[in-house]
Every structure is written in C-alpha cells, then in structure tokens.
Amino acid sequence: MPNVKNRLSIFVDGNNMFYAQQKNGWFFDPRRVLTYFKTEQAEITLVNAFWYTGLKDPQDQRGFRDALISLGYTVRTKILKEYYDDSSGRYSQKANLDIEIVVDMFNTVDQYDRVVLFSGDGDFERAIELLRSKNTHITVVSTEGMIARELRNATDRYIDLNDIRDQIEKTDY
C-alpha cells in the first residue's frame, strides 16, 4: 500500500495553462510534468492525474487528448461557449471547467493527501482552503502575472512555471 502521506493527485486547468505558457513563450510536456512530480520527493505515488480543456467541437484536439490519455491522464472536456463582452464589444469563447475540477478534487479526496494544481484562477481559493483543512498539502503551479493573489495565499506551496522550466519544458516539437 502506498505511503498514506505521499499519495499525489495532479489537476491541470488546461485552458488557464495554455495562456500561461503563451505568456512565458514556452510549453510544458505533460509526460515530463508527471515524471517531475513523481520524482520530486521520495516515495511519492501518483494516484490520479486530470487534464481539463475546452473544445471548439467534439473532435478538437483529438490527437492531443489521446496522447494525454495514453500517458495516464483522465481528460475532462467541455465545448466552448461564445460570450459577448459589452465593455470590449467583442465576442470571446470560454469553457469554464472550474466546477469539474473541484468536483473531481472532492470525489477523489480519500485517494490522496497531496495535490498539485496547475492553475492561477482565484476561483479555486475556497476549494483549496477546504482541502487544506483536511490536512491535504496543496501545491499550485502557475506564473507571475497569471496567479491570483488569493489562490497563492491559500496554498501551501507556489511554484512558478519558469522555476521548473528545465524539468518540464517540451523539447520535441
């Protein structure tokens, strides 16, 4: 049985991370992310890895999603919805998967005691506080300028993507 203090679940807010990676000018490799966090500390057992992403249509990103599944990620998707922004006068697309992430966090809470959340979204603050009250260790991974102050303050540990770039950057384009 895995050491009950070292069971890890990873949750990746794919859309949020896409923009963080664009901002940084480099992309991370989902395989290297798993390897990095499985080996960062001794005796870590990865029990779950989830990836959440919005899609233009059901076939969008099919190859990428299949690759994620083959790596061991559970992939959750939602079709993008179009919204009109009165202030900018423009349409934008959004697939809000925050609820799905939180539902999975709490549905699997008995399986892990460490979480790595790839997101900078402040909407996760309350969920993180509740998980910490259950003695779950929370690490949030994002990047400066994209991490909400309230999320950063709620977590046990914050990692800037740029600080682990050498370990997780995609090198095979």
Image (cartoon, rainbow, N blue to C red):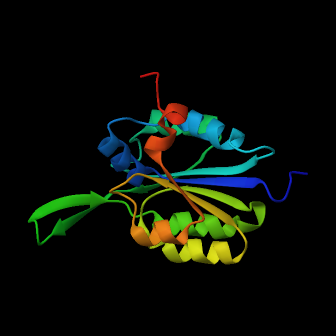
Residue ranking furthest to the left: 89
Query: Which quadrant of the figure has residue 61?
Result: top left
Q: Residue at the spot x=77%, y=67% of the render?
A: 110
Observer-nearest residue: 151 or 94? Answer: 151
Q: Residue at the spot x=91%, y=51% of the render?
A: 1
Q: Which quarter of the image is occupied by the C terminus?
A: top left
Q: Residue at the spot x=56%, y=39% of the render?
A: 68
Residue ranking furthest to the top: 172
Looking at the rendered structure, the number of numbered marks drawn on it comes to 0
Query: Which quadrant of the figure has residue 81?
Result: bottom left
In the rendering, at what x and y percent does residue 131 appear? 65, 72
Observer-nearest residue: 37 or 93? Answer: 37
In the rendering, at what x and y percent does residue 82 appear? 25, 61
Q: Residue at the spot x=61%, y=44% of the render?
A: 73
In the rendering, at what x and y percent does residue 99 appear? 50, 69
Observer-nearest residue: 84 or 26? Answer: 26
Q: Where 77 falls versus 154 (above or below)?
A: above
In the rendering, at what x and y percent does residue 98 appear? 47, 66
Q: Where 42 falls versus 154 (above or below)?
A: above
Observer-nearest residue: 159 or 12? Answer: 159
